[in-house]
Amino acid sequence: MSDFGKGADNAGGSSEENIKHWDDFYNEVPAPANYAEIISGVRKFIGDAKLEERVVVVTSGGTMVPLEQLTVRFVDNFSSGSRGAASTEYFLEEGYKVVFLNRQKSIQPYARHISSVLDVLELDGGANVTVKSCHASKIQTVLERYEKYKTSCFAITYESLGDYLWFLKGVSTELNSIGARGMLYLAAAVSDFYIPKNDMPEHKIQSDRRPEITFSLVPKMLRPLVKDWAPEAYIISFKLETDPNILLQKAEKALKLYQHNMVIANMLTTRKKTVTAVERTGEVMKIDNDDEDKEIESLIVNLVKEKHSKYIQENLTKSPLP
Ligand code: 9Z3
């Protein structure tokens, strides 16, 4: 439990006064059915990391918020999962172990380079299935990279906001066991709104009248994440806006409020070309990608790896290894 009292937990502006405490959210939303099994797998995966190895938790994809208990309709946050999948590959190549917390059916590392099986395979003489020769060398390169790194990646899938937040809490608590060598890279697009179970109709909303849907505000989970779950880790959140005039100020406000290590600010329309990283130290770093053969995630991962190295060094000086 953090040192913030329940009343002040969500402090930071009058607009946040109506937000529930995060404990109430977890009491109200059931954990995913496979939660205990997944978290014990994560514990082993992180526990097996060698002393010199780093682990990053990459979150990826949008969260789904159901409108009905027997869900036919839902609202979704925009994210294809491209940022998370590409970043995962670059982290693996930089020697990180990766816990990839991703939305079901979102873009996947390595698989993203290969088009649909129906495009790459063909019936050879009517009996055997073979890879079309024009795709063979690319598929071979991707498979080689996948084989090399697959044991360094632990994938968890979620669909709803509730499942995402349960896994985030469990995984980040496990990550804290390796201290400063852990990093959280929160690229998932997480809903700010949800409907508590008691306010949600059981059955499909009928269309004989205009629906009245009232959302509640989701507690700001970055607060307990930084204070209680993974206080030792290097924590990076992403800030997504559509209005360029508020982007940087929102990023700076988040850093001030939650006291984590970095916010990477991006605009919906230009997110693949330019992002701005703001560190808690006040340093502002613009990353532009003008090279069509490069992905911006390779530049982002280079930068955050460098900052993470510095953070590990600083923490070693604070409490050197025995
Ligand atoms: C991001 O800003 C990601 O960069 C994108 C990536 C979702 C834009 P794609 O998956 O897109 O490559 O298609 N993620 C964070 C979005 C978010 O929900 N941030 C919250 C906010 O902005 C704070 S945690 O308030």
Image (cartoon, grey):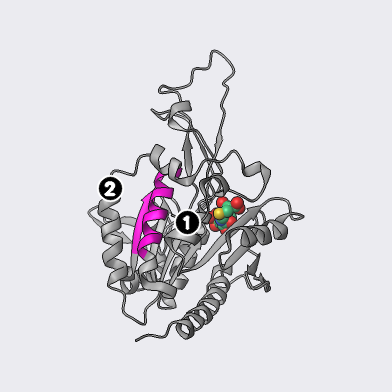
* Residue 299 drawn in magenta: no
Q: Amino acid at mark 1?
A: Ser
| Type of amino acid at the residue the image marks with label 2 | Asn
Span shown in magenta: 154-174
Q: Is residue 161 magenta?
A: yes
Say whether residue 288 is left or right of residue 201. Answer: right
Q: Residue at x 48, y 85 (%)?
A: 317
- N-term-proximal mark, 1 vs 2: 1
Q: Is residue 84 above or below residue 65?
A: below
Q: Main secondary structure of the magenta part?
A: helix
Q: Residue furthest left?
A: 127
Give me the residue at 37% from left, 72% from top.
Answer: 178
Residue 24 placed where, x, y %? 44, 41
Residue 167: percent from left, percent from top = 38, 52
Image location (x, y in percent) of residue 277: 63, 68
Q: CA distance from mark 1 to mark 2?
A: 27 Å
> Which residue position is annotated with label 1?
2
**Is any part of residue 245 visible from this angle?**
yes
Q: Where does the N terminus fall, quadrant-wise? A: bottom left
